[in-house]
């Protein structure tokens, strides 16, 4: 993936983040929490990339420049941040069960999505054959959602204390 491609993808996800902010009616504190959650989950994601590359389960070619890795890190954070606004709303509405169902859906849908990207854009990512890369990808998705949501909750507070929460009648 080139630096320009990474900037383009990050820009598109930034637009989607703004749209999610609007539709979730997130406060500044919640938006800041989702961004910090994205940064934390991105750090975990970079660790997963390094681990799985060392195990030869997948390969993500990086552009040979000093500034690509920070762009990749912040781009990954921007792509993850909208997820935490969605998990905030789900948790506010359905409690921990809603979050658990969302994590399960992400664990199932995420890896096939990545495999489609890898087939479509082999210069962005290549998976090794076998079931281990698939499981590692699924675990990475689960950890990204759980870690990012937990960090957002630490920064922004629990969703039940939000001004938009529905009180029992």
Image (cartoon, rainbow, N blue to C red):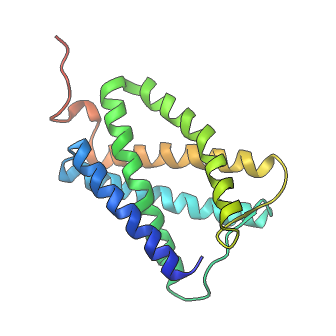
State which quarter of the image contains the C terminus. top left
x, y percent for residue 72: 51, 72
In the image, farthest residue toward the bottom? 65
In the image, farthest residue toward the top? 169
x, y percent for residue 51: 70, 62
Q: Is 78 or 70 nearer to us in this picture?
A: 78
| Figure label count | 0
| Quadrant housing residue 54 | bottom right
x, y percent for residue 99: 44, 32
Name the side, left or right, on which 81 lies relative to 113.
left
Task: Say above or below: 15 vs 30.
Answer: below
Q: Residue at x 28, y 53 (%)?
A: 19
Name the side, left or right, on which 26 lies relative to 111.
left
Q: Is 18 or 89 nearer to us in this picture?
A: 18
In the image, farthest residue toward the right? 130
State which quarter of the image contains the N terminus. bottom right
Q: Residue at x 30, y 30 (%)?
A: 92
Name the side, left or right, on which 26 lies relative to 51.
left
Q: Residue at x 49, y 69 (%)?
A: 73
x, y percent for residue 90: 36, 32
Q: Is 47 or 137 nearer to us in this picture?
A: 137
Q: Is 159 or 25 nearer to us in this picture?
A: 25
Q: Residue at x 48, y 55 (%)?
A: 41
């Amino acid at each position: 993936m080139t630096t320009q491609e990474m900037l383009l993808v990050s820009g598109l996800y930034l637009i989607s983040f703004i749209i999610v902010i609007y539709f979730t009616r997130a406060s500044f504190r919640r938006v800041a929490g989702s961004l910090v959650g994205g940064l934390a989950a991105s750090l975990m994601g970079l660790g997963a990339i390094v681990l799985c590359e060392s195990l030869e389960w997948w390969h993500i070619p990086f552009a040979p420049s000093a500034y690509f890795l920070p762009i990749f890190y912040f781009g990954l954070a921007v792509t993850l941040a909208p997820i935490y606004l969605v998990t905030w709303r789900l948790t506010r509405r359905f409690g921990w069960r809603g979050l658990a169902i969302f994590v399960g859906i992400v664990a199932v849908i995420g890896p096939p999505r990545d495999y489609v990207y890898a087939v479509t854009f082999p210069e962005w990512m290549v998976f090794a054959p076998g079931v281990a890369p698939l499981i590692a990808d699924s675990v990475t998705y689960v950890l990204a959602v759980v870690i990012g949501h937990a960090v957002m909750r630490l920064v922004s507070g629990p969703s039940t204390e939000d001004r938009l929460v529905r009180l029992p009648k």
